[in-house]
Structure formats: structure tokens, C-alpha cells
Amino acid sequence: MPLCARCFAILAGYLLAPVLAGMHIVTPYYLIGLLLLPMLIDGFTQQWKWRTSNNKLRFFTGFSFGIGQSLLISNVVWFLVERLG
């Protein structure tokens, strides 16, 4: 596979961005932060060699990150639509 498990899962999470924006879903920013945090923790603890990650954990943390970014994009889109529209 040309992408690692984490990158593939992030891209899979991105597929939800148009769906979430089309459904006018606005999510609190603390929830978005909670979805982004696991991948950041997993990535940095692995980079600092505190522990070793595995593909299953990389997939779930990447998917969570992708969903969190999709929600963030949806929030920004609807914020701009309401301000400019």
C-alpha cells in the first residue's frame, strides 16, 4: 500500500467533510479538539520513542483525526456562509 495506515485513515475521514458540510452540522470546538488529540498523542509519543505504535492504533487515531478535521472544515464553511451570505 503506498500510504501508511494512519494516512489512509485520515483520507477516509476526509470523505465525511462534504457530507457533514452538506448536512449543516456545526460541532463544538472542544469536541473537535478531542477528536484531533489522540493522533497527536500517538504520533508524538511514537516520534519521541516513548513507545511503539501499531497499524490498528494508527488507523483509529488517523480516522478520528480525519473526522475531526472534516468537522472543523464544516464549521468554517458554515461560519463563512452565515457571515458572507
Image (cartoon, rainbow, N blue to C red):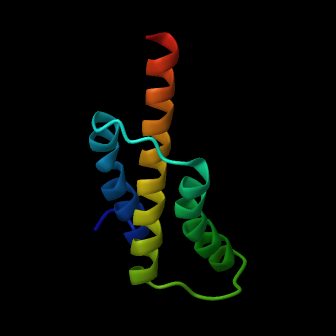
Front residue of this view, candidates 65 and 7: 65
Q: Percent from the top left, x then y, of residue 62?
A: 45, 65
Image quadrant containing the C terminus: top left
Front residue of this view, candidates 50 and 31: 31
Residue depicted at 59% across the width and 48% down the height:
29
Which residue ends up furthest to the bottom in the rendered image? 51
Residue depicted at 64% across the width and 72% down the height:
41
Above or below, 49 against 5 in this view is below
Q: Quadrant of residue 22?
A: top left
Above or below, 30 against 26 in this view is below
Q: Percent from the top left, x then y, of residue 55?
A: 41, 81
Front residue of this view, candidates 22 and 41: 22
Counting the numbered discs, the total is: 0
Above or below, 37 against 16 in this view is below
Residue depicted at 27% across the width and 42% down the height:
19
Q: Position of 36 compared to 15: left or right?
A: right
Residue depicted at 48% across the width and 47% down the height:
27
Q: Percent from the top left, x then y, of residue 53?
A: 53, 84
Q: Percent from the top left, x then y, of residue 78?
A: 44, 28
Above or below, 17 against 51 in this view is above
Q: Quadrant of residue 1?
A: bottom left
